[in-house]
Image: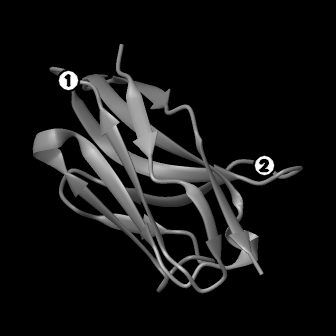
Amino acid sequence: QVQLVESGGGLVQAGGSLRLSCAASATSFSINPMGWYRQAPGKKRELVASITSGGITNYASSVKGRFTISRDNAKNTVYLQMNSLRPEDTAVYYCNANVLISTQRSMSYWGQGTQVTVSS
């Protein structure tokens, strides 16, 4: 069982910045990738950004150039730096970790979610 603890959400004005953190509990398994998803009211959960243990990143087109995902492999921690925030970025942000149990099996874990609210 892997637990994910998120922090860093809050209320910010449009144009402002926030930094989210997500720390995974200790595990003997590799976690690859780690990422952030978000879900706005009435909408489906969507990928915001992900990062592999080797540092390969993937971003939703709506956040490219504004958000930066990074990762500290030694700490099993992933960060999301969010700049130039817009009201449409308002959502609950969830951390996700894909834990590699074996070469053919993985398990996905989710954090509890952290609210990000951007006021206009």
Percent coordinates x, y for residue 23 in the rendering: 31, 38
- Give the class, few, some or many, for how many residues have Cα within 10 Å of label 1's Cα (few <14, many ≥20): few
| Residue located at (56% from left, 76% from top) | 63
| Residue located at (70% from left, 48% from top) | 45
Marked residue nearer the N-terminal end (1 or 2): 1
Q: Is residue 63 left or right of residue 82?
A: right
Dot 2 falls on a residue whose secondary structure is loop
Q: Do the residues under discs 1 and 2 have CB atoms within 8 angstroms?
A: no
- Give the class, few, some or many, for how many residues have Cα within 10 Å of label 2's Cα (few <14, many ≥20): few
Q: How many marks?
A: 2
Task: State which mark lies toward you, 1 or 2.
Answer: 1
In the image, farthest residue toward the left: 74
Whether residue 108 is situated above or below residue 39 in the rendered picture: above
Picture disc at residue 16: none
Q: Is residue 70 left or right of residue 94?
A: left
Quadrant including the N terminus: top left
Whether residue 47 is situated above or below residue 112 in the rendered picture: below
Amino acid at dot 1: Ala
Estimate the spatial distance between the alpha carbons at disc 1 and disc 2, rounded to whole Å.
30 Å
Find disc 2 in the rendering and name its residue.
44
Percent coordinates x, y for residue 30 in the rendering: 21, 32
Picture disc at residue 26: 1
Percent coordinates x, y for residue 31 in the rendering: 27, 36
Quadrant including the C terminus: bottom right
Percent coordinates x, y for residue 119 in the rendering: 74, 74
Q: Is residue 86 left or right of residue 103?
A: right
In the image, farthest residue toward the top: 1
Q: Foreground residue, 118 or 48? A: 118
Q: Foreground residue, 44 or 118? A: 118
Amino acid at dot 2: Lys
